[in-house]
Amino acid sequence: MKPAIIAMPGNEPLAGALAAGLDARLGSATLRRFPDSESYVRIDTPVRGRDVMLVCTMDRPDEKILSLAFLAATARDLGAESVGLVSPYLSYMRQDKRFRKGEAVTSAYFGDLISCYFDWMVTLDPHLHRQHGFSKIYQIPVVVAHAAPLISDWIRRHVSSPVVIGPDHESAQWVAAVARNAGAVHLVLNKHRSGDRKVEISGLRTADHKHGTPVVVDDIISTGRTMAETVRRLREAGYPAPYCVGIHGVFADDAYRELRRAGARKIVTCNAIPHRSNAIDIAPVLIDAIGELDGLVHTIPSARSRTRPKRRREG
């Protein structure tokens, strides 16, 4: 029986591409709010005996997580064989330790929540900070897809004489892989952050590759301050207007407009989060990652025997 793929609102185009690539059934669900703002959830596609994939990128997660959990629970109650999550952008990664007394370690709590309702997860280039993998955060199989080959291909097709630039050492892993696959040189700068929106960029030598076309690459564009400051420093050093490429375009508040004002030549993102800057399709690498899960859920006992609230399965 073909698996069923169901999109959370806003994720329909990606879900359709995944269904076509995986020869799966594209299902549907109804989600709305009652007048008192409680969530109403209904699955409109038969799921009994099927493996179900829910597609939900997790930007602005607090607006989505409760309906997503209800949707997963409904699929299970209606007889789904397994319930997996395809979440290209995975939130709640930064707070992975207690930096100050009394703080919540939300990375762990969010992992527990997802692990309670899903049998597996596929995500794209998560921003792991102090953790080296998912085994300590999630109790389910997690497969990570990578956008570097797609970004490299975009650069080869659209940028002449590219110089790939990472704004900080956290971006070094993405930048090195992108540059290598694009046949380009790369630079990694230094960043000092003194607040959520206060960033200083240093380490740019004015003689470095000024005749190339700079391409600033980072995994997340959230407030946009890191990338905007990098653009300003490049322009001050005499570089041409740079391309700005992000895997996850969160664009909090006025981040997109701020980046435009800083002097970016073009802003390009993957379609991990729907946005007008989307120009790189991640469906192929997500399909490959889902393929790596073939049989995995059914061969790992913990994926089907974790402690969950006991529910009556409906007919």
Image (tube, helix red, strand yellow):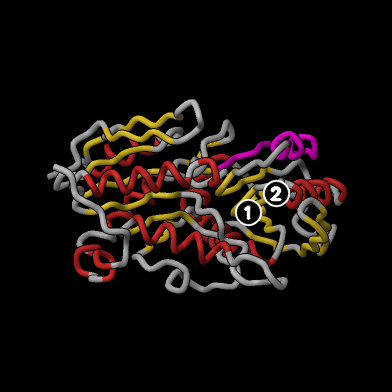
Q: Secondary structure at mark 1?
A: strand
Quadrant where the N terminus sits is top left
Report the span colored magenta: 254-269
What's the CA distance linking mark 1 and mark 2? 13 Å
Is residue 79 shown to the viewer in this render? yes
Q: Amino acid at mark 2?
A: Pro
Q: Residue at x 39, y 48 (%)?
A: 69
Which of the two discs, 1 and 2, sits closer to the camera?
1
- Of residues 11 and 41, the one nearer the viewer is 41
Q: In this picture, is 144 found above or below 60?
A: below
Q: Label 2, on which residue?
A: 214
Q: Residue at x 63, y 54 (%)?
A: 218
Q: Secondary structure at mark 2?
A: strand
260 within the magenta span: yes
Q: Amino acid at mark 1?
A: Asp
288 within the magenta span: no
**Snapshot quadrant of residue 123:** bottom left
Mark 1 closeness class: few <14, some 14–19, many ≥20 residues within 10 Å? many
Q: Residue at x 28, y 35 (%)?
A: 43
**Residue farthest along the top direction in this orientation:** 35
Q: Label 1, on which residue?
A: 218
Q: At which x and y percent is residue 118?
A: 34, 56
